[in-house]
Image (cartoon, helix red, strand yellow):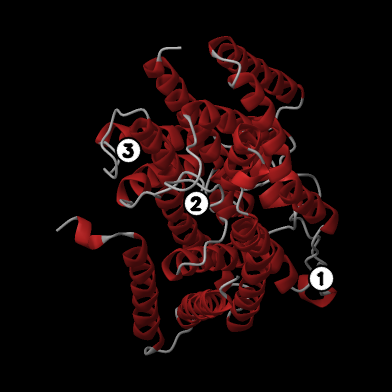
Amino acid sequence: MIEWGSFAAVAIAALVSACLFVGLYALALRLGDGTAAWRRPVSVVLFVLCGLVVLFGLSLIVPWNHFF
Amino acid sequence: MDPTLLVALVIALALFFDFTNGFHDTANAMATPIATGALRAKTAVALAAILNFIGAFLSTTVAQTISGGLIREGEDGVLITPQLILAGLIGAIVWNLVTWLFGLPSSSSHALFGGLIGAAIVGFGIGAIDGGVLVSKILIPAVLAPVTAGLVSFLATKLAFKLTNKRERRGFKVGQIFTSSLVSLAHGTNDAQKTMGVITLTLISAGLQPVGSPPELWVISACAIAIALGTYSGGWRIIKTMGRGITEIEPTQGFSAEASTAATILASSHLGFALSTTQVAAGSVIGTGLGRKGASVRWSTAGRIGLGWLVTIPSAGLVGAGAALLALLGPVGIILDVLLAGAAILTIFLISRRTRVDHRTLATPEPGAFVRPKVRKKARTGDSQ
C-alpha cells in the first residue's frame, strides 16, 4: 500500500542534495577565510556551485514549459 | 438558499482558510532566521509573503479531487456538495486557529482533510472514506516526514559544524536567508494550490465553470493574495515554538535545517511521495538540535507538537461533522454555521489577546538564551607594569 520505493527515493535524494548543498556552502566559507591566494577563487567557485544547486531546486518547482 | 450565494460563502471561507494556512506556515521557513537574527522579524515575514505570492502563480496543476482520494469522490463515488465543503472548511479553519492559539505547528492540509472527512461521514456515512488512502497517504507519511527530515538535518548539521570553525560560521547567517526563501517559495507553490483546487471544484460542481478546466486567473490571484496576507500577518506563536521552543538555534543550524527542509520538500513533491511541509520543518528543527554538540532538544515541546498532529484530523473532523449536521438542515443551518464559526474565530482571537506574542516580543531574546558567559583570560600582571 505504501510505496516504499518512492519513499526511499525521496529520503535518499533529500539526504544527498541537502548534504551536498550544506557541504559546498560550508567549504566555501572555510576556503574564503584563509590567506593563501588560491583559496578565494576556489571559494567563489563553490558558492557558484551552491547557487546552481538552488537553481536546480527551483527548476523542480517551476513548470518551465508553462511559460514557453 | 440561492446556489450562487452558497458558492460565494464557500469561496470566502476557502480564502479565509488560505489566510490561516499562510500565517500557520510562516514559521516553517522563517522561524529559524528570526531566531538567529539573520533577518528581522518583520523583514522575514514580508519576504516570506512575497515569495508565497510569487509561488502561488508558479504552480499550474490543480488536484482533480478535493480530498486527494481520501473521500471516494467521482463517478462511482459520492459528490461532495458545496454545503459539505463549507462544513469541512469551517472544521479546518477552527482547528487551524486553535493550534495557532497553542503555538503548535500542525499541518493545514491535515486540518482540511480532517474537516472534509468529518463532513463527508455526516453526509454519506463512514463508507465514503477510503481507509487505505488515509493510512498510506496521511498517517504513515506523518511519521516518516519528521523522521526523514530530522535525519537529513542531523547529518547536514554535523557536516556543517565539521567543515567550519567558529569564525567562519558567521557566514551561515547570509546563507539562511536563501534557504528560508526557497522553503517559502516551495510552500507558496504547494499550498495556495490546495485552496485553488477547492474553489475551482466548487465552481465546477455549481455549474459555473466547465468540467476539467484550470483555475481562473481571479481564483489564482485571490488565493495568492490570501496566502501572502496570512503569511505577512505572521503566526508569531508558532514562530516562537519553532524558533525557540524546540531547541536553541545558531545560524549554522538554521542554515542546515532549512536546507534539509527545502531538499526534503522538493524531493517529495518531485518524486511523488507527498510529505507535509510543517512536519518536515519541525523534524528538521529537532534534527538540527540533536546535531549540535551541547544543544538540547526539549522533548516535552516536541511531544506536544506530536500530540497536536495526532489529534488534528479527528478534531477538525469533529468540528466539520458538527458543521455538516447543521448545514444539511438547509439555509437556516448554513447561516447558523457561518455565525457559529464567526463566534468561534472571535472567541479564539479574544483569548489570544490575553497573552500577546508578536514581532516585538520575539525581537528580544529570552533572558539566558544565547548568552554564554565567557571565561576571561587572566590578565598577565607582568605586561601592565
In the structure shown, which secondary structural element does the residue marked by tag 2 occupy? loop
Residue B378 position (above or below residue B372): below
Mark 1–mark 2 Cα distance, whole angstroms, equals: 68 Å
Q: In the image, what residue occupies the spot 45% across and 85% down?
A: A35
Q: Do labels 1 and 3 share a chain?
A: yes
Quadrant location, the C terminus of chain B: bottom right
The residue that label 2 is drawn on is B68
Q: In the image, what residue occupies the spot 27% across and 36% down?
A: B216
Residue B169 position (above or below residue B5): below
Point out which mark residue B220 bears: 3
Query: What amino acid type is highlighted by mark number 1?
Result: Ala
Point out which mark residue B286 bears: none
Seen from the viewer's position, the closer of residues B272 and B168 is B272
Mark 3–mark 2 Cα distance, whole angstroms, equals: 19 Å
Q: Can residue B24 be seen in this view?
A: yes
Query: What amino acid type is highlighted by mark number 2?
Result: Gly
Q: Can residue B365 be seen in this view?
A: no
Task: Judge the density around disc 2: few (<14), some (14-19), many (≥20) Cα neighbours within 10 Å.
Answer: some
